[in-house]
Image: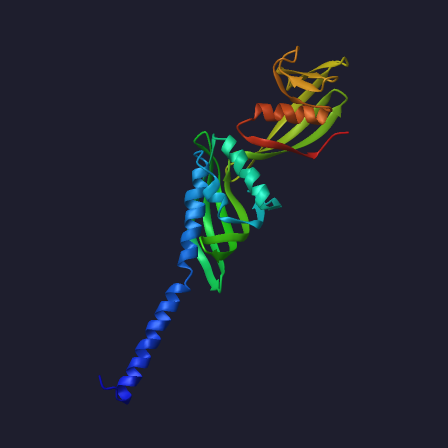
Amino acid sequence: MNFNTKNIRAFIVLFSLLTVSFWGSAQSGEGFKNFIHETFEINLNNLSSGNNSTPFLRAFGENLIWMDVDVSIDGRVSAQRQSKDGLRKIVNRLDLQRFLTVKWKIISFSDVQVRENTRMASFEVAVELYADNEMIQSGKNYIRTLGKKTEDGYVIDYISIMQIADKLYKGRCFVSMNKENPSKITTETLFPNGTDYEGVTNDFYFIGTDKLRVVKLDEGGTNFYWNTIQGIVSTDKLGEQKIGDASDANTVITVILKNQNINKCTNMIVTNPIN
């Protein structure tokens, strides 16, 4: 084939276009996006079914840094940092709590970058948490990941997650206490109720001074029994129906409140304890 100047120019343009197309495909980060989909939409969701945790854990490096920032429905913010070992422990706990089901669905990717062997991605996830098939929390996660290309695929070395709750039906409950007199304590408890918190007032009456004290929840309400020597709270005098341990009145109240609201409270947080 004879190449004149016009043919040579056309060949160079065509070669440039093909090269740009090839490198654009190779450097687009589609492989990393597919890896993220598999890790969080398949392997993470499968943990709730008691499936092997190895595929999920294998996606993270041994020097992993995992940052969690949680924004509750009332605007409270908490942060936590996890290592690879901490992630293993969380996964093991989830495996023991088969009644809990976590569902992640990636909504969109806002950014994917490729730099040599490094991969960076930002994406948004819709999250739902179920207990015995009943949804107890929903929200969105805004995630930033940093990973690298390996011979076997990819591995994540850094991940930061901002968790924003949209609806919460079970979670942390907040208790405010006021000592009316030596034997009566009034509480105001905030329970998660979808998009906000519901406030409920209770009166606790501490009866007697013996080692076994009666704790009445509201007038004409349920009696509980606090063995001050053994530090046991129970629903019977013999302590056979134990509901928790307590060494002071603050803890007695939180044990009873959590027992009475087991479907709403994962843990009780006292905002102003009594002396």
Q: Position of residue 161 (x, y in %)?
A: 54, 49
Q: Nearer the viewer, residue 5 or 152?
A: 152
Q: Position of residue 226 (x, y in %)?
A: 69, 17
Q: Toward which corner of the image does residue 189 lie, by quadrant?
A: top right
Q: Nearer the viewer, residue 140 or 93?
A: 93
Q: Nearer the viewer, residue 90 or 177?
A: 90
Q: Nearer the viewer, residue 17 or 267?
A: 17
Residue drawn at point x = 39 percent, y = 64 percent: 26
On screen, residue 133 above or below 111: above
Q: Is residue 10 visible?
A: yes
Q: Position of residue 71 (x, y in %)?
A: 57, 46
Q: Is residue 77 left or right of residue 155?
A: right
Residue drawn at point x = 47 percent, y = 30 percent: 98
Residue drawn at point x = 28 percent, y = 82 percent: 10
Q: Is residue 13 left or right of residue 176?
A: left
The image's colouring method is rainbow
Residue drawn at point x = 30 percent, y = 77 percent: 14
Q: Toward which corner of the image does residue 28 lie, by quadrant?
A: bottom left
Q: Position of residue 182 (x, y in %)?
A: 77, 21
Which residue is farthest top? 238
Total marks placed: 0
Q: Is residue 176 left or right of residue 30?
A: right
Name the quarter where the C terminus is drawn.
Answer: top right
Which residue is farthest left? 1
